[in-house]
Image (spheres, grey):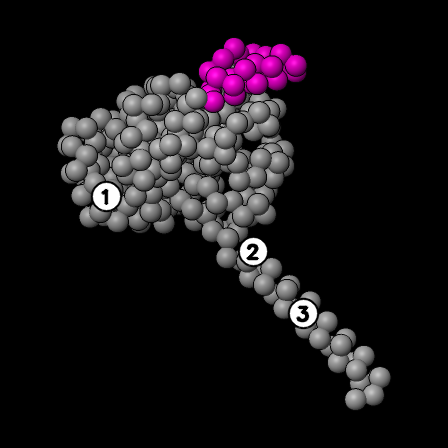
Amino acid sequence: MNRRQFIRKIGLAGIGVFISSRFVQQAAENQFKFRYMVGSSMYGELPLSEILPGVRATGAQFIDIWPRVHGNQREQMDEMGHDQFEALLRKHQVKLGCLTHYDLGPFGLASEMPIAKRFNCGVMVCGGQGPKGLKGGRLKTAVKDFAEQLKPHLELAEQHGVSIAIENHGNNLIDSSDSLKWLMEFRSSMNLKIALAPYHLETLGVDALELGRLVEDLGNRIGIFYAWQHGMGCMKKLPKEQELLQMPGRGNFDFAPVAKALKKIDFSGFTEIFMHPVPRGIPILPTAEETTAEINRGRAYLEKLL
């Protein structure tokens, strides 16, 4: 082989490597999928025997169990017995993905951790606790104090193989983009995650592009992403068509930049298609079948964005 032939072969090999690596990259991007989980509160206080058959129909394998006042499926678990609940999950090929406990808060989860461990449940969601309405340096200090207070609870969470995910709930210590970033900066354990709710950030003036950038900043420290927008709110009774504007694909919020960011970080946490009905504790639509269909409508919207 002469010098010219050698250089030509090396050049072709380099092009081949480039094309191959680019193909692998594109294939990985195209393979990204949302990891769906269904919130039991979407079904109000309907029985688990009616809810679980529809979970797989929404593209999900996991259920997020809520207690009163938003639902009562956590209470149903105790009433039927955990063995029967486990059998019901197995029958419908559904796994317990999350226990949501705003009622207990971040410092009251200890009693639920053995239950999470039994069912191999990876996440528990609650709000943050601390002073409200802070900004700047005072907010940063308060978030640091909160992270410090969480340490023993996170140690216990690690022992039980569960993460604590703090939602950016409105009118809370952890409600703004800055508070979320600082919480992750000060966290003492990988078992502290974020449950990211666009609804509440919208009320603070965060638009879709800003939310996309926040998702990129937080990365897979997000444990749960709620596909939930503000619409016309969830605090007063509205006609159903207005109440449903909280659902993805119905209101004015453009989830495209957020979906792009989730895809970019290869988001591995849960995605919940979500809203709150008024009053709390009722299904978002009258029947389990209608509720499942509405979740699927929101899912079709999200899938198109990918």
Residue identifier under label 1: 89
The disc, 2 or 3, on the residue closer to the chain's N-terminal end is: 3
The disc, 1 or 3, on the residue closer to the chain's N-terminal end is: 3
User: Is residue 145 covered in magenta?
Assistant: yes
Q: Amino acid at mark 1?
A: Leu
Residue at point 43% right, 27% down? Answer: 155
Q: Amino acid at mark 2?
A: Glu
Q: Which SS class for mark 3? A: helix
Q: Is residue 94 visible?
A: yes
Residue identifier under label 3: 17
Residue at point 33% right, 43% down? Answer: 62
**Along the line of sight, the residue nearer the viewer: 53 or 267:** 267
Q: Which SS class for mark 2? A: helix
Q: Position of residue 108 (x, y in %)?
A: 36, 19
Residue at point 56% right, 56% down? Answer: 29
Q: Is residue 34 above or below residue 187?
A: below
**Mark 3 and mark 2 in contact (Cβ < 8 Å)?**
no
**Along the line of sight, the residue nearer the viewer: 244 or 165:** 165
